[in-house]
Amino acid sequence: MTILVTGATGNVGRHVVAELLKAGQGVRALTRRPDTAGLPAGAQVVAGDLERPGTLPDALSGVERMFLFPVLEAAEEVVDLAVRAGVRRIVLLSSAAVTAGWDTEYHLPVERAVEASGLEWTHVRPGEFAVNSLYMWGPSIRADRTVVEPFPDRAGTPVHEWDIAEVVAAALVEDGHVGTAHTLSGPQTLTAREQVAAIAEALGEEIRLDHTTVDRARAFYRAQGGWAAENADFLLGYEDYSGAESVPGEDDPGAESVPDEYSGEEQTEPQDAPGTVTAEAVTGRPARTYATWARDHAADFR
C-alpha cells in the first residue's frame, strides 16, 4: 500500500513519514523542495505543491491512502484529484477549534470537502501545539534566556507534535478510525509560567520570565518577526479566530477581562471541547508530557 504524506517536511508530516515507515508502509512524501527535505531513507520524496493542484497528479498516481495538510483555497480541487486518482482514504490535519465551534471558515470547510468526496475519512484535530512555544519564545530564549509574557498564568494543554503524528499514522493504517474526528490535547494543563520552567529545566539554565503589558508584548513579538509576528495579534487577543478585531485584556487585577476566545465564558476552549482526548486514547501509548517535549527540543532553544 502506498500512502501519500502531504506537508511531509512540516512539524507533524515529518513524524508521520517516520511512523509509517516504522509500520512497514510504502510512503510517498510530498514537498515543494525535495532536494532539501531531509526525510528518512525509505520514503519516496516527490515534488508538489498543494497550493498548485496541477503539480499533484503524478504524486497521487497509485496512492491508496493520503495524509492531507489543510490548504483551504485548493481543498476541493485537491480532494477531487485524489478521488480521480483512486485514493480510498484521507486523514486530514484539522483543528480542535472546529470541535469548540471557533473555526467555521478555515478547517471546517476543508473537513466538509473531504467528507463530501465519498472517500473514507478521519479528521485529526489537535489543540495547542507545544511547538508554538519554540516559535514564540525561542528567539528570546536563545538571545538572553528571557521570555516576554503578558499572561503567565493562562493555562493550556499543549500537545507534542509526535503524538499528533502517531494518531495520524494510526488513522491511516488501522480500520477503526473511519468517520471519526479525534480532538487531541496534551496530557497536562500547564500555565505559561510552568511551561517556561519546563524549558529551563530541559536546558539546565535559568530563564527569566518578563511579565509585561499586552501592548508591550505585542510590540516585542511584532519586532521579533517570523511566526511570532504573524500570530501575535491572535495569541494576545487583538483579533479573534476569524481575524476580526478584538480587545485584549490582561490577567492582572483591575485589568479588562480576557476576550471570550480566551476566557471560555461564552465559548468552549478547544482543550475543553466535548470528546477531547489525549493520544493515548487512540494509540494506547501514554501521551508525551510537555517536559518530554522540552527535552526533545532543548537543542533548539540553545
Image: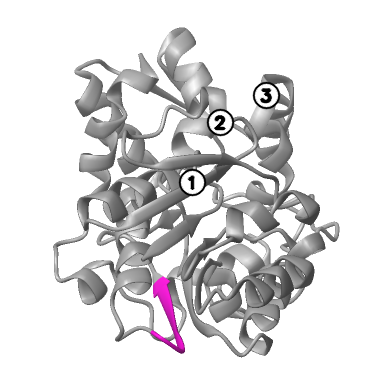
Range drawn in magenta: 178-183
x, y (%) of residue 78? 72, 65
**Mark toward the start of the polypeptide (1 vs 2):** 1
User: Is disc 3 placed on a helix, strand or loop?
Assistant: helix
In this rendering, position of residue 11 left or right of residue 16: right
Q: Which residue is mark 3?
A: 220
Residue 176 visible somewhere in the drawing: yes
| Relative height, residue 287 to residue 82 (above, below) | above
**What predominant SS class does the magenta segment belong to?**
strand
x, y (%) of residue 83? 65, 77
Q: Which residue is mark 2?
A: 34
CA neighbours of label 1 inside 10 A, class few (<14), some (14 to 19), many (20+): many
User: Is disc 2 placed on a helix, strand or loop?
Assistant: helix
Residue 29 image label: 1
Nearer to me, 26 or 208: 26
x, y (%) of residue 262? 59, 63
Foreground disc of the pair 3, 2: 2
**Mark toward the start of the polypeptide (1 vs 3):** 1
| Relative height, residue 112 to residue 22 (above, below) | below
Residue occupying the point 77% across, 56% down? 53
Mark 2 residue type: Pro
Mark 3 residue type: Phe
In this rendering, position of residue 296 left or right of residue 137: left
- Assess whether mark 2 and mark 1 are in contact (beta carbons under 8 angstroms): no
Mark 1 residue type: Ala
